[in-house]
Amino acid sequence: MLFKGLGLILSLALFGYLFKSSDLGNAINEAWVDAHIRGHGVEGTLLFLAMGALFTAVGLPRQIIAFLAGYAFGLLPGTLLGALAALLGCMTTFLYARFFGRRLLRDRLGKRAARFDQFIHDHPFSMTLLIRLLPVGSNVLTNLAAGISSAHMAPFLAASFIGFLPQTLVFALVGSGVNVAPTLRIGAAAVLFLLSGVLGAYLYHRHRHGLSIDDKVDAALGETEHP
């Protein structure tokens, strides 16, 4: 599980190198990030947020948006804007499921939504935060399940934003041009990713109290036997 995440970090680093050094990378750079985002002030920022929200709402990994945010805005602004874009995508999917897709999604996600309800019922903020810190699971399916469940939107979104920050920081660091050696930057991102993943798995093991959000998540984290 963690090796897959490290592989994503390394692949994004390679993408960043090609982005800057190859003709294709230069074309993409000029056509989108440099032409429409960098140096375009509020308009460029809003365009990035709209693009990030749309892509994460339909299933593009939010780590890629974080990588692009780091490239476009730098480490700290990129972290905040990448997390905000993911949050807007999360809200879009949540609202779609709640107001338009309940009948369509009920047959497919009804059991998952019921488990989500049970998992977060007593402590909606902290348990949603716990879900977001996990290094496994589907962001879009979680948003859809929350939308057709009885979860309140405010604590779900607030906890989601905070939970998005650690991995967003990691991938924004990979994409950013911070003034350190690329090897050191990528190595720091890999270490931070491992620490974030281990922390999320530890907290899930410690605080789930016999509850389960998903069988596949439990299997990935070695939680096949309920305490």
Image: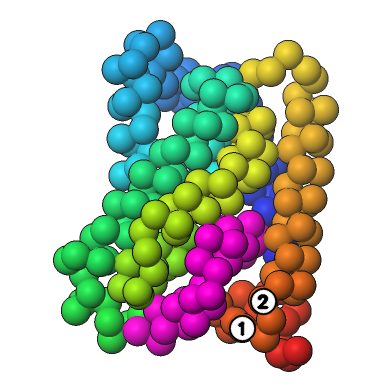
Picture coordinates of residue 196 (x, y %)?
Answer: 73, 51
Disc 1 and disc 2 in contact, CB within 8 angstroms? yes
Relative side of 189 to 164, left or right = right
Relative side of 92 to 122, left or right = left
- As drawn, the label of residue 211 is 1
Picture coordinates of residue 9 (x, y %)?
Answer: 67, 43
Judge the density around disc 2: few (<14), some (14-19), many (≥20) Cα neighbours within 10 Å: some
Residue 125 visible in the snapshot? yes
Which quarter shows the N terminus?
bottom right
Picture coordinates of residue 28 (x, y %)?
Answer: 42, 24
Looking at the image, which residue is at 71% across and 60% down? Answer: 200
Q: Please identify the residue farthest to the top as the structure is shown.
A: 39
Residue annotated with mark 2:
208
Q: Reply above or below: 174 against 32.
A: below
Front residue of 227 and 134: 227
Q: Could you tell me which secondary element the residue under label 1 belongs to?
A: loop
Picture coordinates of residue 26 (x, y %)?
Answer: 47, 18
The magenta region covers 110-137
Q: Amino acid at mark 2?
A: Arg
